[in-house]
Image: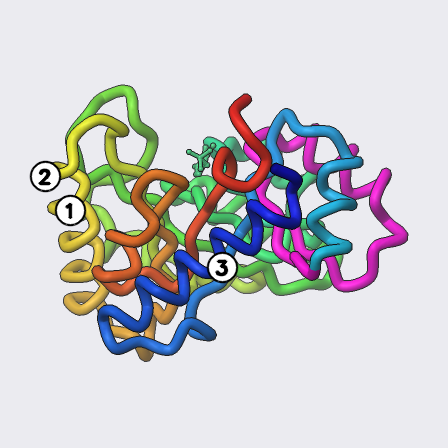
Amino acid sequence: MDVATRLADVHDGIAAAARASGRDPREITLVAVSKRKPAAMIRAAYAAGQRDFGENYAQELRDKARELEDLDALRWHFIGPFQSNKARLLVGRATLLHSVSEQRHLEAVAARAQSIGVEQRVLVQLNLSGESTKHGVAGATLAALLRASETLEGVRIEGLMTMPPADDDDVTARCFAELRVLRDAHGGVQRLPQLSMGMSHDYALAIAHGSTCVRVGTAIFGSR
Ligand SMILES: *Cc1c(COP(=O)(O)O)cnc(C)c1O
């Protein structure tokens, strides 16, 4: 199957999942995760109408952004582990940083954003499974990060992101439900409109739990 066909299948899947929970599919952004896939595949997805692409590595995002500069209105999302020293590569280049998880990340993003005169949209990544191998903050830290962001110019927290462990549906469902509860406890949809959750194998479940942004790689571009 080619990229366009797989992309159409994922759109159908998103629409079906949205309808099943009484939601409008247009509320949900599909981020096509193109990490370690060649620029030619991104061009194919773009030609089929896809505009949002996700990358895990800052340098790879920068390189692909340069290579694909000619594609108007293409939006890059940074979804890999964030490090402060990557702010220079990512701020102003990525439409949304999904994986900010420390106050010093916010400070680094704000500093870079101010120096180039942009406002950078970010999400806070939560670690809800308690796994030490997964990046993100515990829910208890979220209020402090939100407070810190209020005093920083150039960075705007627009929502939350999480990535549950791959292998357990019950844990995954619990993580998705918990992300939404956290959002509702910290200002609700008004303050934090975006919930980035759901990947190739669990995006339908994530949509049932209120996801506004699914990050889908394998189902569009094939296995890595
Ligand atoms: C790789 C990755 C994805 C996409 O995973 P697939 O299973 O290929 O859909 C989504 N989110 C993050 C954070 C990733 O690193």
Q: Are marks 1 and 3 in contact (CB under 8 Å)?
A: no
Of 56 and 89, the residue lying toward us:
56
Of 105 and 224, the residue lying toward us:
224
Return the x and y of residue 145 as percentages of the image width and height.
32, 53
Return the x and y of residue 34 as percentages of the image width and height.
61, 37
Local SS, label 3: helix
Q: Are marks 3 and 2 in contact (CB under 8 Å)?
A: no
x 72%, y 54%: residue:
115
Q: Which residue is mark 1?
A: 173
- Does residue 135 sit above or below 29 in this rendering? above
What amino acid is found at the position of numbered circle 3 in the picture?
A: His
Is 69 in the magenta? yes
Q: Which residue is mark 2?
A: 170
x 65%, y 57%: residue:
50
Q: What is the CA distance from the residue labelled 1 to the residue labelled 2?
A: 5 Å
Return the x and y of residue 42 as percentages of the image width and height.
72, 42
Q: Please state which of the two labelled residues, at mark 1 or mark 3, is closer to the viewer.
A: 3
The magenta segment is 49-76
- Label ID, residue 11: 3
Mark 3 near ligand 1 (CB under 8 Å)? no
What amino acid is found at the position of numbered circle 2 in the picture?
A: Asp
x 24%, y 37%: residue:
127
Is 72 in the magenta? yes
x 38%, y 64%: residue:
212
Mark 2 near ligand 1 (CB under 8 Å)? no
Local SS, label 1: helix
Mark 1 near ligand 1 (CB under 8 Å)? no
- Does residue 215 sit above or below 212 in this rendering? above
Quadrant position of residue 87: top right
